[in-house]
Amino acid sequence: MTLEHEPLGDSDDAAQHGDRPTTDAPPGSRPRADVKVTADLVVLTVRQAEFKVMLVERGKEPFVGKLALPGGFLRPGEDLETTAHRELAEETGLDSSGLHLQQVRTYSRPDRDPRGRVITTVFLAIAPDLPSPIASTDARRAEWVTVEDSLKNKLAFDHRIIFDDALEEARRLLEYTTIAAAFCAEAFTISELHQVYEIVWGVPVEPRNFRRKVLSVAGFLKDTGLKRHSNGRPAILYQRGPADLLHPAMLRPGTGL
């Protein structure tokens, strides 16, 4: 497997000078950087009422032993989304076929990888209660780490910056899209959806106001006609509706919710 965690080429000189222009360009032409391309993933889930991100422990230099986001190098014939799906399966054992990947942004700072010039595109994936990972290839281990703990760790490469950006993107998406339902099981209660908003945003959300707002957004929720019976009042079960965008927006507390 060709990973972001592997050597960039056969030449040590290329690893030391990955941002150096190629020397075989025709006279008078503009220099071009020798660049490698990768895909990295920020995979978020809610497990046991905790907000978690998938991290792997690197088994090779650079940053051996450090936690990092899963990801790796583009292979011939692949597009970046295919690379992201393959790398997630190879490094963590997770079946990514059912995961929707949303592109966050591209990172191209010349010094972001000590082995040479590497440009990475980052994908965000969200799913409910994903299973425990199984590390393989050059990852020593793979695990779900709480977002709070992840923010305290010094991640490999520029992955802390990437993670911060993707986390903020996930929180922003909850304001303007119906993606919060992706953290829930296929059928869920409004209370469970409310818990997702509180966990992902990291702030309390007033429950009555929340219920009124989610039920007022056309196409956000679809009543399944079923109820979940517990010790209290039976709770209506919903599914994600056909809408992709929230109108009006569901702004975070302190910004208008």
Image (cartoon, helix red, strand yellow):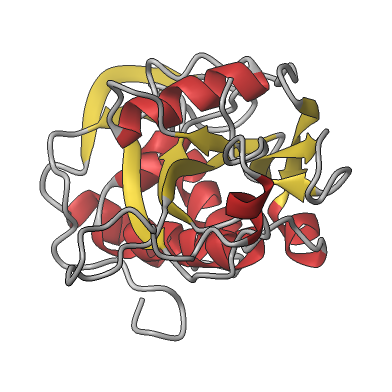
Say if 5 sits above or below 20 in the image. above
Say if 68 sits above or below 114 in the image. above
Residue at 40 percent of width and 64 percent of height: 21
Is 127 positioned to the left or the right of 53 in the image?
A: left
Residue at 20 percent of width and 66 percent of height: 27
Residue at 68 percent of width and 60 percent of height: 114
- Rendered-image quadrant of the C terminus: bottom left
Q: Nearer the viewer, residue 81 or 26?
A: 26
User: Residue 19: horizontal and vertical position, in percent?
Assistant: 49, 65
Outermost residue, front direction? 27
Residue at 51 percent of width and 40 percent of height: 192
Asked where in the image residue 240 lies, by quadrant, the reply is top left
Is 65 positioned to the left or the right of 38 in the image?
A: right
Is 212 positioned to the left or the right of 114 in the image?
A: left
> Residue 230: in sight, yes or no?
yes
Q: Nearer the viewer, residue 150 or 156?
A: 156
